Amino acid sequence: MVRKFDKNMFIMLLSIMVGAIIITYFVADLVRMSQIEEIEEKYTQEIEDIEKKNVNFTSQFLDSLVSLNLAKEFRMYGEINYNIAYTFYKTILSETNEVRFSEYKNYTIENCTDAMSNFWYSYLNFNDSIKNFAKSKEYTNYDVYLGLGDLYINLSKSGAKLMNLRYNVSMYLRDLSELLIFDNNTVKFSQNVSELLNQFNETLADFLIEDGIYSDLIDEIDLYELHDQIR
């Protein structure tokens, strides 16, 4: 017997349809909330990773600058020693007093030795800064920071090369000074120093060329538009 479609049946079917819609919406909402939570968790972690990287980059970059500043400081002391040594060396060559000759010769050798020590420590710190700046680049994906890191690495490499050359110049000057003797009221070398003088002059010329490269890199860093590139 066919059941007659009446008002009660209509209400029952309507109730079933409304219930199905509500359940479907509820399930869909649960799925949506779950997806939102998943996305939030994912991006929260990414944000935390980015923030951690930024902190690590800043910390590592500051450590790099400490090494670089130490290198500059040792270089400054080395330059003072070298300039004193070279001044005494030039004075010795025309000295006519044997006592002053001995004193000035000792001052020259001592300051050359101190200069070599300071240039060596500067060289070591420049090398440390190269490694530190390279490490800092691992904590950032920003091209502007990577570019700045490259500039500082190149500066540190140039500084290390400078200190190697300056060390050798000081060593040659010390060797020349040690060969000076006072003979018959005249200052002269105890042996032929032509080759040593050539090494001194050639290394000094190489130093001046590299010093120009180093200065250009400093200017490039000073003019680096960090904030403008970030914006």
Image (cartoon, helix red, strand yellow):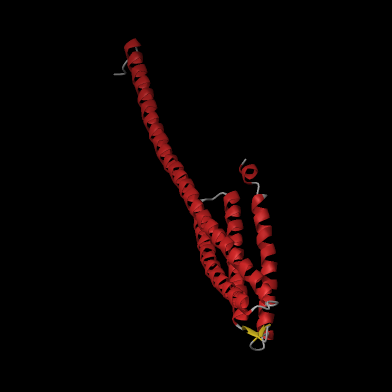
Identify which residue is drawn at 62% across, 80% down: 98
Residue 21 seen by the camera? yes
Q: In this view, does 73 lie above or below 53?
A: below
Residue 74 image offset from top left, x and y in percent: 54, 62
Give the quadrant of residue 213: bottom right
Residue 172 seen by the camera? no
Give the quadrant of residue 68: bottom right
Identify which residue is drawn at 39% across, 26% down: 25
Image quarter hosting the N terminus: top left
Identify which residue is drawn at 43% across, 42% down: 48
Residue 224 image offset from top left, x and y in percent: 65, 49
Q: In this view, does 159 lie above or below 105?
A: above
In the image, taking residue 122 as reference, residue 46 lies left or right, namely: left
Q: In this view, does 161 lie above or below 196?
A: above
Give the quadrant of residue 229: top right
Residue 19 image offset from top left, x and y in percent: 34, 21
Observer-nearest of 124 and 196: 196
In the image, taking residue 78 as reference, residue 195 lies left or right, namely: right
